[in-house]
Amino acid sequence: ARRALIPMVGAVRKAGTSVLLEDVAVPVQNLAKLCNGINEMFQKFDYHDGSAFGHALEGNLHLVFTQGFETPEEVQRYADMMDYLCKMVCDLEGSLKAEHGTGRNVAPYVEMEWGKKATAVMWELKGLFDGEMLLNPGVVLNTNPTIHKENLKPLPVAHGVVDTCMECGFCESACPSGHVTLTPRQRIVATRELARLDASQTPADLAKAEEMRKLYSYAALDTCAADGMCAEKCPVNINTGRMVKELRAQAIKPDSAENRAASVFRSNFGLVMGGVPALLNAVDLFHGVVGTTAMKAIAGAVGPFVGVHWNPYIATGAAAIKPQPAVTVPPQMEKKKVVYFATCVSRAMGPARGDSETASIHEKTMSVLAKAGYEVVLPEDLSNACCGLIFDSRGLPAQGQEQAAKLEQTLLAASEGGTIPVLCDTSPCLMRVKDTFKDAQLKSAMYEPTEFVVKFLLNRLKLDRKEASIAVHVPCSSKKLKKDAYFEQIAKACATKVTVSPVPCCGMAGDRGLRYPEISGGGVASAVVAPPGAAIVHDSKAGSTSTSAWSEVNGSCSEGFSTSRTCEISLSNQTGRHFKSIMYLVDRCSSPLQA
């Protein structure tokens, strides 16, 4: 809570201003005078949003206030306030820095605090150890009395989604692309710098902005997963991915070929997606003929030209959706209905070559539902059904919204106005419809696989712990929807040892990880290869919970399970273990309840 307090204060500041923190201390007997003096100071210099908190027993206070640096008058107001603060603290026999080290902001006041003689000794010691002034020059000691007013960093208004960011950096550990290009904080800084350069209107700055945009397009926009996991870490919930999507959309003109092609694709969605399984099977057949080594070489040469990069765990084509197996229930159990929304990803992608499973996700889902006594209702015109995420993530929100609106009407009809539960087999698609659908009853009736299994199926199935050691990965969307516990509950019921992935985001972001494979685990510093944290290992046989390096999943787990087919491809590629839908695990370990 303490770490988040300052960013939360900064989030309510006026756009374009900076949030500043000062750290002072006085003898405890002078603390009351310091508090009164700070209040008077904030009033005198018009810092009406200023606040102070700290450690009373140590006489230590942190001052938080916001400040703009856009005009000379604002800079001078800031300098006058600092003069007043430092003199007040010194008069109260205090320290201008308590918990934190002296920086350029306080360097001009070191002599005021310590006196000329002590300051001269400091300079002498500095000269002995760092005669050429190479170590942190001018930060602790500085002869320039106005250094705290110079080289000030502006925070120009850049984009409504991120203008409240104070660049604390909490978001960075959740970003899958920071090891390749930019973290969320760096994307915001770059966006602000472009705004500053554009606003200056000088030829030099405009030329610099033009040059910067050449790098910005790839580094800030193309390689952003836009999954919103940065918002989960951000104390004020700033979703840099949302900004990136909006900027992608701004870059696509309404009359552009890309926009027109997307509209044609949307209008013929079922026809286009219907051909994907055949294409995937053709690629897999070629892989089988030439072998993995030759396929890697060929794909490596072709990939940059076609814009999609192959890896050995690319899915085969999914089988066509078939009627559900016969549903029989014991006398004490009644049949129930569920609308099954098999997403376009599940309708297109089956298991990867070499996986022990050969059936498609929808086949396994149908099997589980039949064993639990659920009759499946398939939506009308399922081949054209899509949540629109494939368009929205590319900066094509209009086409994405059209698809989402059409899907909402389709599911409303199938679920009889949301009175029948709806199972969506892909977590990112479920989050998308929860975010975009308007009908509250329908939204409340929609479930991703793990929640549906736990809430509706576990009491209608017999589960046996058949697996020795498996891994589970909770995709970004399920983390944001707070479904983590359902994954663990199912996995623990089916396996003796369960390793929970610490990967915050696999970087696949739909097919973006295939177009930019460097994000989806490219390199030793990636969030998939070296996540910021250890894996949690639940061992029911030993009755223990421990931690383990994620790199050990290859040797300790036979396979992995998740709820997003494209994420599973990325995880498989990086761990060397086949990841697939958790519905495969449920089907494998479940049987119908007997009378």
Image (tube, helix red, strand yellow):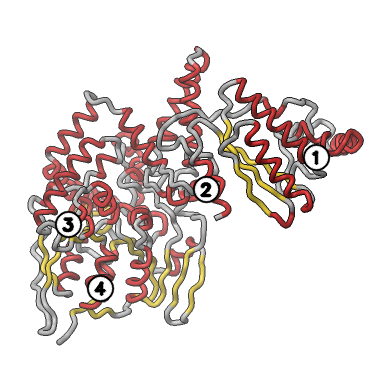
Quickly name the residue at label 2.
170
**First in sequence: mark 3 vs mark 2:** 2
Camera-side residue of 442 and 33? 33
Q: The residue under label 2 is which amino acid type? A: Phe
> In the rendered image, which residue does mark 4 sit on?
588
Q: Is residue 239 left or right of residue 117?
A: left
* Residue for point 68% across, 48% down: 61
- On screen, residue 105 versus residue 299, left or right, reads right
Question: Which x, y percent locates residue 517?
Answer: 38, 44
Q: Residues within 10 Å of mark 3 (few under 14, many from 20)?
A: many
**At 89% across and 33% down in the image, what residue appears?**
116
Q: Is residue 156 above or below residue 567?
A: above
What amino acid type should be assigned to the residue bearing mark 1?
Cys
Residue 281 lies left or right of residue 545; in this view the side is: left
Identify the amino acid type marked 3: Phe
- Mark linked to residue 341: 3
Image coordinates for residue 104, horizontal then vertical, percent: 71, 33
User: Visible in this render: residue 404?
Assistant: yes
Q: Which residue is mark 1?
A: 90
Determine the secondary structure under disc 4.
helix
Instruction: Tell me where residue 548 appears, x and y as whole percent.
Output: 51, 67
SS category of the residue bearing label 3: strand
The N terminus sits in image quarter: bottom right
Q: Quadrant of residue 576?
A: bottom left
Outermost right residue:
117
Q: Quadrant of residue 498?
A: bottom left
Q: Given contact means CB atoms under 8 Å apart, are the residues at marks 3 and 4 in contact?
A: no
